[in-house]
């Protein structure tokens, strides 16, 4: 790994350095009877995830005699904690990682690579949907993880709010989002909810808008191209949902972890951009027939070079740390979590799609939400750059957008120049 990447990773983990690592597992003899697992937050709360996962962990223990101790880690902490574990050699046996981080974490050398022999150990390469497996590591290298849940962004809209406003169909362009959002804003409700203080969410939307404006965040050599006119226009269009269109509550500038979903579920916002929100909304007592699901909108008149992309190829991968003292048990757990039964149970509960070929077409995933997600992944989604600096891109660009949302919330103008300066600073920090 390059000194530059080491320095970047070291900087990223400073904020998490005080966290206590759990030392691989609490089975120091390496008997394979206990594993520690860091799961990403997929449901409405950390506690909800524990309740969803525990029956599967109990089933695994019944089948193998291997106990799994799970900790559900919020997204705001997950990347820093993973980097801390990667650089220290202290941490869990098995982890969930956002698929966009695969190449960055692979570059640390801390993850077990799933070469052909290791893939055979858990069922074989052909078991996984090729597009999902392609987002599990750097191009040309064995995957550093395997897919667990497949996701894409969608637009969720409140059916009653739309009907009361005389809106008969969800918006298909950003211009329509602004118009519809203004009609829906008022009387304690806003048109759209966002997570303005969530760097990963911000970076994901920046990527999609950039694709629609014909931009890229890295060139073919993997060098950052943050402050191009296309990226400036893309970020401004996103932040303008609050700054100019005024369809987003200024308080959303402080939202960092599921608060936008809560606003939507409780009627404080009429629209939401999210990845497989169904299970989260159910946990907050929003009935499935109370909302509709539609593809994320496009620009009405894309500029030359603009792409028909409305989501990143999103998903959650499962990986094994090399420092585990129970590698065989850890791989057994990966095999179990990607088995047909576990895939149907967990993806059906979370509203995500199974990335394993044997159950990808299961009728359990034929609901409206999953149909939109499947169509998006098949036709209009694009992968984020699988470069070693991708996770740093998410942190730096996502934080720049967080600062722009904060400016908008305070009534400060968000101009092309102020966006360019923020992105230019982020690019300098990359270098």
Image (cartoon, helix red, strand yellow):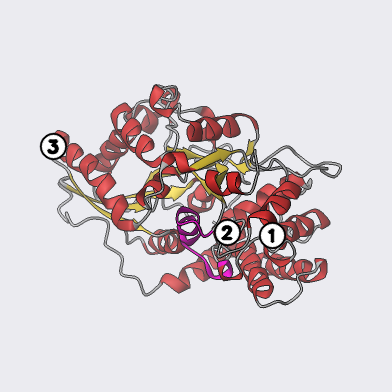
Q: Which mark is residue 241?
A: 1
Q: Residue at x 73, y 59 (%)?
A: 226
Circle 2 residue:
194
Q: Categorize mark 1 by other alpha carbons within 10 Å: few (<14), some (14-19), many (20+).
A: many
In this rendered view, identify the residue nearer to me: 298 or 16.
Answer: 298
Question: Which mark is in front, 1 or 3?
Answer: 1
Looking at the picture, tell me which residue is in the foreground, 138 or 353: 353
Indicate which disc, 1 or 2, sits on the residue closer to the N terminus.
Answer: 2
- From the top left corner, tell me how far across and down residue 145 is, in percent: 43, 41
For label 2, the crowd category at 10 Å Cα-Cα, with few meaning under 14, some 14 to 19 and many 20 or more, is many
Q: Is residue 209 above or below residue 56?
A: below
**Residue at (31%, 34%) from the top-left corner?**
345
Mark 1–mark 2 contact, CB under 8 Å? yes
The residue mark sitting in front, 3 or 2, is: 2
Q: Which residue is denoted by mark 3 in the rendering?
A: 62
Q: Identify the residue shown where x is 15% and y is 46%.
A: 33
The location of residue 299, given as percent across then percent down, is: 76, 45
In the rendered image, which quarter is residue 87 located in?
bottom left
Q: Is residue 318 visible?
A: yes
């Amino acid at each position: 790994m390059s000194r530059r990447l080491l320095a970047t990773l070291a900087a990223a983990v400073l904020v998490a350095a005080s966290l206590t690592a759990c030392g691989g597992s609490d089975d120091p003899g390496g008997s394979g009877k206990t594993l520690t697992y860091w799961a990403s937050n997929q449901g409405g709360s950390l506690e909800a995830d524990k309740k969803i996962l525990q029956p599967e962990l109990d089933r695994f223990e019944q089948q193998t005699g291997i106990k799994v101790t799970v900790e559900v880690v919020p997204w705001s902490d997950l990347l820093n904690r993973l980097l801390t574990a990667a650089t220290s050699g202290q941490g869990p046996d098995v982890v969930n990682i956002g698929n966009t981080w695969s190449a960055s974490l692979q570059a640390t050398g801390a993850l077990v690579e799933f070469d052909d022999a290791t893939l055979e150990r858990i069922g074989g390469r052909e078991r996984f949907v090729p597009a999902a497996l392609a987002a599990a590591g750097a191009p040309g290298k064995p995957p550093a993880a395997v897919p667990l849940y497949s996701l894409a962004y969608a637009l969720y809209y409140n059916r009653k709010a739309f009907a009361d406003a005389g809106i008969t169909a969800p918006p298909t362009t950003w211009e329509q989002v602004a118009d519809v959002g203004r009609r829906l804003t008022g009387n304690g409700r806003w048109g759209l909810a966002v997570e303005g203080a969530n760097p990963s969410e911000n970076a994901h939307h920046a990527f999609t808008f950039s694709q629609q404006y014909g931009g890229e965040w890295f060139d073919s050599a993997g060098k950052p191209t943050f402050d191009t006119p296309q990226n400036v226009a893309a970020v401004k269009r996103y932040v303008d949902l609050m700054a100019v269109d005024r369809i987003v509550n200024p308080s959303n500038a402080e939202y960092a972890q599921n608060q936008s979903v809560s606003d939507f579920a409780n009627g404080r916002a009429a629209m939401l951009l999210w990845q497989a929100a169904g299970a989260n909304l159910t946990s907050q007592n929003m009935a499935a027939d109370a909302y509709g699901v539609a593809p994320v909108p496009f620009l009405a008149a894309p500029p030359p070079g603009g792409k028909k992309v409305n989501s990143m190829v999103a998903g959650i991968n499962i990986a094994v740390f090399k420092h585990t003292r129970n590698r065989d048990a850890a791989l057994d757990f990966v095999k179990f979590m990607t088995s047909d039964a576990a895939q149907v149970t967990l993806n059906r509960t979370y509203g995500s799609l199974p990335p394993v070929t044997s159950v990808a077409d299961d009728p359990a995933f034929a609901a409206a939400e999953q149909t939109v997600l499947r169509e998006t992944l098949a036709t209009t989604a694009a992968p984020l750059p699988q470069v070693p600096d991708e996770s740093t891109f998410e942190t730096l660009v996502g934080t720049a957008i967080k600062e722009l949302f904060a400016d908008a919330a305070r009534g400060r103008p968000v101009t092309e120049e102020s966006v360019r300066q923020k992105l230019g600073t982020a690019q300098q920090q990359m270098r």
